[in-house]
């Protein structure tokens, strides 16, 4: 860690270029987030997170310090797993020291939040931190500016006119995410590509995607550039034309949970209930469609961080486009759902009793949800039979997906 970084004791939190709060580092390696008073007083303030929304609809401002980690909303903005270790090593920061990781990675987070060190002359200077000296330093660090949360190795990228992908020197403002191949499982980018295209074929909103050869991606670190095969490029839906940031949060953030609570801490009915309250039947029913689709393709890994809200107008949440649709059953036989669906985590199919338990818990009407189940099963079967992209999958993966769809058809009767 550099001496300059060690001196940082406060991080300014910006939303749509407005400072809305500060994360302070306290004695004992504790951290606390506090909103700016003008943000609290503003009746038209942009939304940061439903986790800061009180039962009466007001802003929750009474928060407690958090030991070692950042508060949950901010902790979820940092990368997980191998990517965190990789970036922490490059930054010379211990991966457990989230405050310092955020100080380094806060310029290109998911959504519209930007986090900047306030010490060392950066506080209230009226400049984005990219003065000439700082820009030169960051160009040497390369990928350090990218930090979308996730366990796959991903890099921010911009699409070139030729269709190729180049990793920006600073990794800031890229409108595509490059997801590199797994070193453990075969054809994961192809798997996700096909599942997303299958979802698109049945009417689920998914971002633009492309399969690209790893060898054709410029600017990768040497360890990543040596990978063979294809990578999946996914257009970022939290970036609009001209790089404008669209705020978003995942459901671990919505529920105020740390990333390691993304499995099992809530149920799918918990997500549906929030969507019913915040987005009405449109978002809640679309969530059901995607959940049913996930069961149909054997996608067990739809944890809390794989469902997100977007804030296109800065204040009103909508369900984001779908992402991270991967059939996990071919890799993990007997895999189970990340969260409970109608008091079960089984992928053996969707039953009437299961859906009834789900709707009772979510306080949603049963009949329209069951119609969505039947409709999604029928559409997915028809789309899979005519999907040209499925030939990209190894035969063994195709057989598992086809068997899973047939199992679901049998379960629904």
Image (cartoon, rainbow, N blue to C red):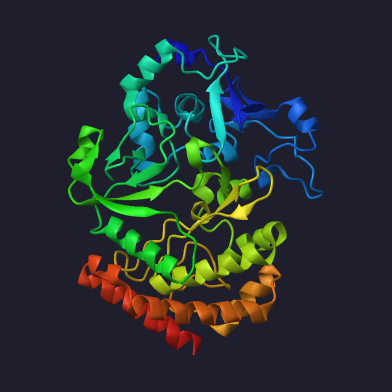
**Residue found at x 56% / y 42%:** 246
**Residue found at x 29% / y 67%:** 389
Q: Quadrant of residue 123?
A: top right
Q: State the quadrant of the N terminus.
A: top left
Give the percent coordinates (x, y) of residue 25.
59, 22
278 or 55, which lies in front? 278
- The relative height of residue 267 versus residue 167 in the rendered view (above or below) is below
128 or 185, which lies in front? 128
Total labels drawn:
0
- The relative height of residue 89 versus residue 149 in the rendered view (above or below) is above
**Residue found at x 46% / y 71%:** 293
**Residue found at x 57% / y 46%:** 249
Q: Is residue 349 visible?
A: no
Q: Quadrant of residue 215?
A: top left
Q: Residue furthest bottom?
A: 413
Give the percent coordinates (x, y) of residue 43.
80, 37
* Left or right: 342, with 185 as reference point: right
* Left or right: 73, with 223 as reference point: right
Give the percent coordinates (x, y) of residue 228.
17, 48
Give the percent coordinates (x, y) of residue 127.
55, 16
- The relative height of residue 232 versus residue 205 in the rendered view (above or below) is above
* Left or right: 273, with 323 as reference point: right
Q: Is residue 101 visible?
A: yes
Q: Quadrant of residue 331?
A: bottom left
């Amino acid at each position: 860690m550099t001496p300059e970084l060690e001196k940082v004791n406060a991080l300014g939190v910006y939303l749509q270029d407005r400072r809305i709060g500060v994360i302070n580092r306290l004695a004992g390696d504790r951290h606390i987030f506090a909103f700016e008073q003008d943000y609290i007083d503003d009746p038209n303030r942009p939304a940061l997170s439903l986790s800061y929304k009180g039962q009466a609809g007001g802003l929750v401002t009474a928060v407690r310090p958090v030991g070692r980690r950042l508060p949950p909303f901010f902790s979820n903005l940092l990368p997980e797993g191998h990517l965190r270790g990789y970036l922490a090593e490059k930054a010379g920061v211990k991966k457990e020291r989230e405050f310092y990781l955020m100080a380094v990675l806060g310029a290109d987070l998911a959504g519209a939040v930007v986090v900047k060190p306030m010490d060392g002359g950066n506080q209230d200077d009226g400049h984005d931190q990219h003065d000439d000296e700082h820009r030169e330093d960051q160009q040497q660090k390369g990928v350090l500016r990218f930090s979308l949360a996730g366990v796959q190795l991903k890099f921010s990228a911009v699409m070139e006119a030729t269709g190729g992908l180049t990793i920006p020197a600073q990794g800031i403002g890229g409108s595509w995410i490059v997801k590199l191949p797994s070193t453990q499982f075969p054809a994961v980018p192809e798997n996700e590509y096909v599942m997303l295209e299958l979802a698109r074929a049945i009417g689920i909103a998914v971002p633009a995607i492309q399969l690209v050869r790893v060898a054709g991606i410029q600017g990768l670190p040497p360890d990543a550039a040596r990978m063979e095969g294809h990578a999946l490029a996914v257009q970022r839906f939290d970036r609009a034309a001209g790089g404008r940031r669209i705020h978003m949060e995942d459901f671990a953030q919505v529920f105020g949970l740390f990333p390691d609570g993304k499995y099992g801490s809530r149920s799918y009915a918990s997500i549906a209930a929030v969507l019913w309250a915040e987005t009405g039947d449109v978002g809640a029913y679309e969530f059901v469609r995607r959940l049913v689709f996930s069961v149909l393709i054997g996608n067990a890994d739809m944890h809390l961080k794989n469902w997100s809200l977007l804030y296109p107008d800065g204040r009103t949440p909508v369900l984001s486009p779908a992402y991270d649709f991967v059939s996990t059953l071919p890799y993990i036989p007997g895999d189970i759902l990340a969260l409970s669906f109608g008091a079960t985590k089984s992928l053996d199919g969707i039953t009437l009793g299961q859906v009834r338990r789900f709707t009772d818990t979510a306080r949603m009407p049963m009949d329209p949800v069951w119609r969505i189940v039947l409709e999604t099963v029928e559409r997915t079967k028809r789309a899979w039979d005519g999907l040209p992209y499925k030939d990209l999958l190894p035969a063994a993966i195709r057989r598992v997906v086809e068997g899973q769809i047939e199992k679901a058809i049998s379960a629904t009767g």
